[in-house]
Image (cartoon, rainbow, N blue to C red):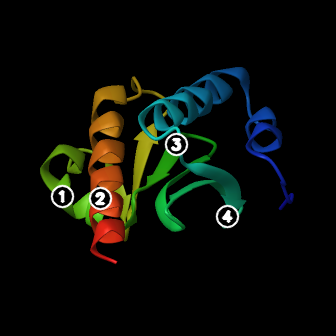
Amino acid sequence: MKTFTTVDQYIQEFEKETQERLNAIRKLILEIAPQAVESISYGMPAYKVNGKPLVYFGGYKSHIGFYATPTGHKAFEKELSKYKQGKGSVQFPLSEPLPVKLIKEIVLFRLSENQQKHQKK
């Protein structure tokens, strides 16, 4: 497995169609949370706000993996039920349109959750 130091390096490793989807998710996250710190964590693009994880995403052969920590997945359990899932992860198949509206709602939820926790400190 290759080691990446930037999200640009990571995204460039994929086929054009997958790159477009990864870039769309990246752009969406940074539009919603411009203060997010972008990095590579667990070998994939990761975003933190207030020093705490917001979301992660990754490209695979036949899907995009999206990781919104267990709380983000729990809050959108019904909406995500049509997708293959793991603990704290969901797979968006490359054979289907990227659910941009749903991803946006999840990122907004996680940002709000993150900010509320930070304000309590």
Residue at 86% across / 57% down in the picture?
Answer: 2
How many neighbours does mark 3 have within 10 angstroms: few (below 14), some (14-19), or many (20 or more)?
many
How many neighbours does mark 1 have within 10 angstroms: few (below 14), some (14-19), or many (20 or more)?
few
Numbered-mark total: 4
The residue at which mark 4 appears reads as 41
Q: Amino acid at mark 2?
A: Gly
Q: Classify mark 3: helix, strand or loop.
A: strand
Q: Classify mark 2: helix, strand or loop.
A: helix
Task: Decide: is 48 above or below 8.
Answer: below
- Foreground pick, 73 / 59: 73
The CA span between labels 1 and 2 is 5 Å
Q: Quadrant of the C terminus?
A: bottom left
How many neighbours does mark 4 have within 10 angstroms: few (below 14), some (14-19), or many (20 or more)?
few
Disc marking residue 72: 2
The residue at which mark 3 appears reads as 64
Residue 108: horizontal and vertical position, in percent? 31, 43
Q: Quadrant of residue 12?
A: top right
Residue at 33% across / 59% down in the picture?
Answer: 115
Q: Nearer the viewer, mark 3 or mark 1?
A: 1
Residue 58 appears left or right of 68? right
Q: Amino acid at mark 4?
A: Ser
The CA span between labels 3 and 4 is 16 Å
